[in-house]
Each structure stands twice: as C-alpha cells, then as structure tokens.
C-alpha cells in the first residue's frame, strides 16, 4: 500500500515536472582544413621563419540545452569546445559559453540573467555560431585561431550578467535596443595565475567592485539593419610589461570606452555587411609620457597608446538561394602591441564561397591573404612586410 | 458555330485563370481564440521574422510547412525572404535564445488541424484549405 502511494506521488511529481516543455538538446559543429604559409619580405628576422603547415579538425563544437518553463520563462546553457579540444592532450579549450534564464515580458522587453553574450554590434552575439556565418576563418577579432593575438574581451564587452533587449515596430520600421551590465574583463577575475586577493576571492570571481556596462541602439527597415554600440570598462594594467626583458610596472586600472557601429543591407542579390569597433583608453599624461619613452627605447616591442581598432566589410552575392560568393576585408590593431600588430595593424583580403546543402549543413571555402609590416630594427632592410596565405575548406552543421 | 466555339474557349480560359488565381491565394489562418480578426502584411512579416511574438496582447504559436510547396514559396515571397534565408533567421533565434522558430508541419491539412486545436496558433495554407475550424486573418494574392 505504501509502495503504491509512493508510486502515485512519484508519477504526480514527474508529470508535474514534464508539464513544462521537454528539454531541447541541439548544437553545431564546424570542421575544417586549412593550408597555411607565411612569407617575410627580404628574409625572416632573427627568431622568425617562413613556415608552411596544414591543419584540420574541429574548430568549433557547441552543445546547447534549452528549456521552456512556461509563463514567458526559458533557460539556455551553451557549452563550447574549440580547436580539437582534448583535456588529455592539452588541446583547445572547453568553457561554459552561456548559461542564463530568460523572461519574455513583451517584444519590447526581454530580460536575460546569468552568463550572456550581449547584443553589442551585430556580430558578437553570433560570432561563434558557425552555421550562421559564411566564413571558415571569421573576421580576425572573432576567429578562434586569432585568440593568441588579442583577448576579444579587450575590444568587445565581457559577457553580461544582466541583459535587457527588445524590439519596437513603428510601421515598417523596427527599433531595437539592448542594455547590459556584467563582470569586468577576465584580467580582474581571480585565477591561479592571477590570485588577486588571496584567501578572499575564489578563482573565477571578480576581485574589483565595478561592473562593465553597455548597450546598442539600432533599427531594421526591410533588408537594412544598422546600429551603434557603446560599452565601458577598465583595463587591468597593474603589471604592465614595459620591455622585452619582461620588466613590469603598475599603471593601475585604466578606464576605457568601446565604440561600435554595424551595418547590413541587401539589394538585388547582394548583401553588404560591415562593423567598426574602437577602444579608446583614458590614460593619464604620466602614462602617456611613459609609453612614449618606452616606445622610443624599443619601437618593435611597445606602442605609444592602448587604443585598439577593428573593422571588416563583406560583400556577398547570392548566386542562388543556396550558393553565395563573397569578398571580405578585415583589419585589427592593438596599438600598444607592435610586436604582433606591426606598424600598420594586421589586415587581410578574403575570397570565399558557401553552399547550403540543406537547412542544417553548409559547405564553405575561403582564401585568405593577411598582411602586416614590422620594424625589425635589423641593420639592413629594417622595415619588412609579412604575408600569410591560407586556403580553407570546411563544413558547418547544426544538429 | 465558329463564334460559339470561340466563346466557349474564352469562357474555359477565363475559368481556368480564375481557378488558378484562387489556388494561388494563400490564407494566413489563426485559432479562433486569437483576439484579432485581421492582420496587416507588416505584422505577419514581424511575426515570421520573430521580431514580435504576440497578437492582440497575447502570445502566439507559429506553424510552418516543412516542404517547399507553391503555398510556402508564395508566402515567403510576401515575407520578402526565400525559405533558405528564413531558416537562417530562425536558426539564429534558436541559437541565440532570442525566439522560438515556427513548428514545422508536413501538410496543409496538418497546419489547419494544428491551428484549429492550438490556442494562439497562426499558420498559412492555400486559401481553399482554410476551413470552418479556423479564421482567416489575411489573404496573400
């Protein structure tokens, strides 16, 4: 009898749980092959070389879990594995990309709370959602392979904790907005390599009081979408490396503003997409003077400002509903880091094509030609050009 | 006699044209509890682009045909995006957690049955399929 009662209670509880919509599991993968080669103008400076290599594997693998709880509440968790992730071999990385609960009050007010990729410019929200993108190798800032050059959260906002967004139709025009706040950049988060307040702040948690903030306003009108974005945070320069010997100085926490603009328009089979991002740092005159002096001592290693800039433009032509070709130009520069970004930044020309086999599978091809120019401080031909050639083929699929 | 033949041919041709026009019309249908009696083109576009998810202050559930039938092609012509592009909009909404894509249904009869039985449901079928169990909010000519 007791067993029977327990069984009934269990059935009632379970059926109550499943009165909500079932858990949805879905995701996407991009697998690709790339043939890489780089060439130095004249000859490679000491410590550098001309390389040629091929690589293939899983660039991106995301598994998402979504659940509709009813009453306008839903949840989403997004696990990300990049660059052939293997904990056994130390390859790539795994992280919780997003995990939030969402409340849809009205189309003009949707609230997300948790870990959210914010709506900042058009691309950030989908930068790693490869089935939505035509590229094998994404515009530089968003490409996982460029992650060793610059931390994207130094140019884009950190993932937000509280995110509001909405859309307001006004006739045939749709106004859009987002507003968000979240953690400071990762350099303020306590970690084994950066134990900011030992004994007080657990690894993975912020060790400063302030929060990053930002938002976007924009519109859609037919096939035109445009917007401007703004975010503010600080850069942790408490242990700034000022020379090639690794000497560090404390420049404090430098306030900075991140400006963005995005634009997409389609007409007669052509789609033009572009984004611009600029990070402007509010440094003291003493810091500016120090940077100038360090730059004079070693212009190959250190730049004169903390400003950063990124933009890209893609012109796509839809040959058919399923087949498209595109040309893209992209540019990325972190002025304080000429060791990587050279005298004029790191920029590239890309030609590509993609074919949608069906709604889930996209075949992609891309040719990339990247450039930079460096002051090598060699006695002969000190200014040398650097070129990369990459041929890529890949497939993205959603499941 | 010749005159009568010509007249008959003309009548047949006109009849065929009228029939094909009627077949070509697509009806946007809704469950009878949906609080509005008509929708304009902009609202339907905003619904299927997942810009809005409510009509008359109440949330709606959208249905879509899974195969590219003439009805679907004509409906998405009105929306202004071919099916492949529309699927990308829906996939983006799903992957970013910003909206719920329409539920795919195999046949127009199934769309009518689903819309008739689901509160707040909206779908599209050829006009001659829209039966008494649903209400027509808009006709795409």
Image: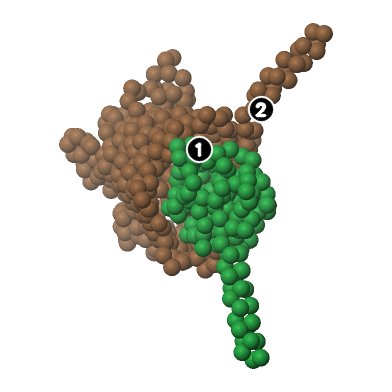
Residue at position x 49%, y 46% from top?
B37
Is residue A277 visible to the viewer in this orientation of the structure? no
Q: Colour of chain B?
A: green
Image-quadrant location for residue A247: top left
Subunit of label 2: A
Q: Name the disc covering residue A18, or none.
A: 2
Q: Where residue A188 appears, x then y in whole percent? A: 38, 28
Q: Is residue B128 left or right of residue A377?
A: right
| Picture layout, residue A333 above or below residue A185 | below
| Picture layout, residue A350 above or below residue A295 | below
Q: Where residue A11 appears, x then y in whole percent? A: 73, 20
- Residue sitting nearer the eye, A249 or A205: A205
Q: Is residue A356 left or right of residue A189?
A: right
| Helix, strand or loop for disc 1 | strand
Query: Which residue is the site of mark 1?
Result: B59
| Picture layout, residue A62 above or below residue A393 | above
Q: Is residue B13 left or right of residue A217?
A: right
Q: Where residue A98 appears, x then y in whole percent? A: 51, 34
The chain in brown: A
The crowd level at tag 1 (other Cα within 10 Å; few <14, some 14-19, many 20+) is: some
Q: Where residue A334 appears, x then y in whole percent? A: 33, 46
Q: Is residue A280 left or right of residue B49?
A: left
Subunit of label 1: B
The crowd level at tag 2 (other Cα within 10 Å; few <14, some 14-19, many 20+) is: few
Whether tag 2 and tag 1 are in contact, CB under 8 A, the answer is: no
Image quarter where the N terminus of chain A lies is top right
Q: How is the model colour-coded?
A: by chain
């Amino acid at each position: 009898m007791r067993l029977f009662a327990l069984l009934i209670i269990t059935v009632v509880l379970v059926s109550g749980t499943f009165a909500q919509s079932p858990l949805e599991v879905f995701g996407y993968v991009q697998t690709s092959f790339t043939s890489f080669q780089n060439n130095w103008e004249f000859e490679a400076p000491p410590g550098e070389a001309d390389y040629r290599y091929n690589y293939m594997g899983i660039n991106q693998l995301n598994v998402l879990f979504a659940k509709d709880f009813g009453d306008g509440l839903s949840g989403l968790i997004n696990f990300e594995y990049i660059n052939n992730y293997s904990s056994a071999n130390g390859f790539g990385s795994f992280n919780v990309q997003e995990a939030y609960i969402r409340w849809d009050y009205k189309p003009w007010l949707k609230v997300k709370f948790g870990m959210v990729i914010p709506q900042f410019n058009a691309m950030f929200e989908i930068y790693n959602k490869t089935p939505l993108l035509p590229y094998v190798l994404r515009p530089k800032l968003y490409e996982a392979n460029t992650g060793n050059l610059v931390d994207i959260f130094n140019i884009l906002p950190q993932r937000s904790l509280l995110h509001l967004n909405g859309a307001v139709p006004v006739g045939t025009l749709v106004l859009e907005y987002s507003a968000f706040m979240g953690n400071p950049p990762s350099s303020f988060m306590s970690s084994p390599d950066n134990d900011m307040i030992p004994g007080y702040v657990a690894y993975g948690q912020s060790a400063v009081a302030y929060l990053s903030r930002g938002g976007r306003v924009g519109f859609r009108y037919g096939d035109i979408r445009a917007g401007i974005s703004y975010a503010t945070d600080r850069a942790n320069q408490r242990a700034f490396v000022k020379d090639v010997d690794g000497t560090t100085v404390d420049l404090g926490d430098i306030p900075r503003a991140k400006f963005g603009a995005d634009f997409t328009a389609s007409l007669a089979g052509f789609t033009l997409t572009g984004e611009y991002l600029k990070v402007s740092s509010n440094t003291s005159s003493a810091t500016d003077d120090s940077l100038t002096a360090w730059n004079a001592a070693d212009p190959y290693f250190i730049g004169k400002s903390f400003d950063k800039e990124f933009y890209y433009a893609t012109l796509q032509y839809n040959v058919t509903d399923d087949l498209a070709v595109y040309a893209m130009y992209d540019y990325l520069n972190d002025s304080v880091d000429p060791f990587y970004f050279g005298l004029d930044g790191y920029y590239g020309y890309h030609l590509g094509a993609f074919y949608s086999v069906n709604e889930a599978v996209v075949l992609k091809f891309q040719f990339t030609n990247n450039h930079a120019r460096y002051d090598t401080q060699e006695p002969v031909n000190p200014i040398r050009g650097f070129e990369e050639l990459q041929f890529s083929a890949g497939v993205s699929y959603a499941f | 006699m010749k005159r009568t033949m010509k007249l008959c041919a003309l009548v047949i041709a006109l009849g065929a044209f009228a029939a094909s026009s009627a077949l070509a019309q697509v009806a946007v249908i809704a469950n009878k509890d949906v609080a509005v009696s008509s929708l304009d083109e902009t609202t339907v576009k905003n619904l299927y682009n997942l810009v809005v998810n409510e009509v008359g202050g109440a949330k709606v559930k959208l249905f879509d045909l899974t195969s590219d039938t003439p009805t679907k092609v004509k409906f998405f012509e009105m929306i202004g995006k071919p099916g492949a592009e529309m699927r990308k909009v829906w996939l983006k909404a799903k992957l970013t957690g910003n909206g719920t894509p329409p539920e795919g249904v195999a046949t127009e009869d199934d769309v009518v049955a689903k819309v008739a039985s689901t509160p707040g449901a909206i779908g599209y079928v050829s006009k001659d399929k829209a039966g008494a169990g649903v209400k027509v909010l808009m006709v795409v000519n």
